[in-house]
Amino acid sequence: MSRFEISVSPEASNPYLTSRSGGTVTSGGRFRCPSCRHEVVLDRHGVYGLQRNLLVENIIDMYKQGSSSSKPAPEPPCEQPTCEEHEDERINIYCVSCGVPTCSLCKVFGAHKDCEVAPLNNVFQKQKGELTDCISMLVGNNERVQAIITQLEETCRAIDENGRRQKSKVCETFDHLYAVLEEKKGEMTLRINAEQDEKLHYIRSLRRKYSDHLESMAKVLESGIQTMDESEMAIFLQR
């Protein structure tokens, strides 16, 4: 007989089991396995003599562990604080005049007997409501401030992008101006060179002309001086 599953009731510790037909199965009795439908014979140990189903036992253990771990941990009891002057008295009222929680004995016999008091729960609910309103207001203010910060960040990005665009445009403009100036520079340089060559050629031609004239005049002068040195009148007049 292979392993099988069987539901064990609290009566399994007894040597007798109640069958579906109302009878009992004693040691040495027979019944059919609910899984494989084979006939099982019980010995003198009863159901405890059957072969163990380790798979079923492991599943049961895992289920028990999961059930125990899924239970929420019990919350620690919230202890209500007691009065500093009356250690056995719990704080249950609120002194409106002094703005502090206190106990009933302090109101009747203690330092707050002439003060105005109110139920602790009422003051708690009121202040908690006020705190809730303040928190809501702060959350709203934080959202508005965050929206302003986001808008400022977008403005910074827009200014940065616009600045880069303007600098790029200025660089392009000056590059174009540089190109135009270089072109004009080349044209003016060529014009100056042409005028310079033309004037130099003219001046040099004049210089050669006057040099030739000066040379011829020097020859005439030399001839005149030689003639002045001539003492013979006939020879002088022939020259």
Image (cartoon, helix red, strand yellow):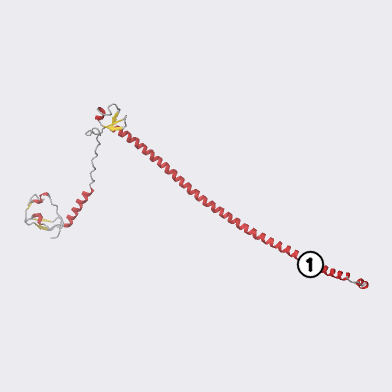
Helix, strand or loop at label 1? It is helix
Task: Pick the quarter of the image with the N terminus.
Answer: bottom left
The structure residue drawn at horizontal position 43% and vertical position 43%, both measured from the top left corner, is: 147
User: Which residue in the protein does label 1 denote?
Assistant: 211
Q: Position of residue 87 (x, y in %)?
A: 22, 34
Question: Position of 96 compared to 40: left or right?
Answer: right
Name the spot of residue 10 as percent of width and height, x first: 11, 49
Q: Is residue 164 left or right of residue 115?
A: right
Q: Residue furthest top?
A: 114
Q: Is residue 125 visible?
A: yes
Tell whether 130 sits left or right of 224. Answer: left
Is residue 197 left or right of 235 when viewed as pictured? Answer: left
> Tag 1: residue type?
Ser
Q: Quadrant of residue 101?
A: top left
Name the residue nearer the viewer: 27 or 165.
165
Foreground residue among 43 and 125 = 125
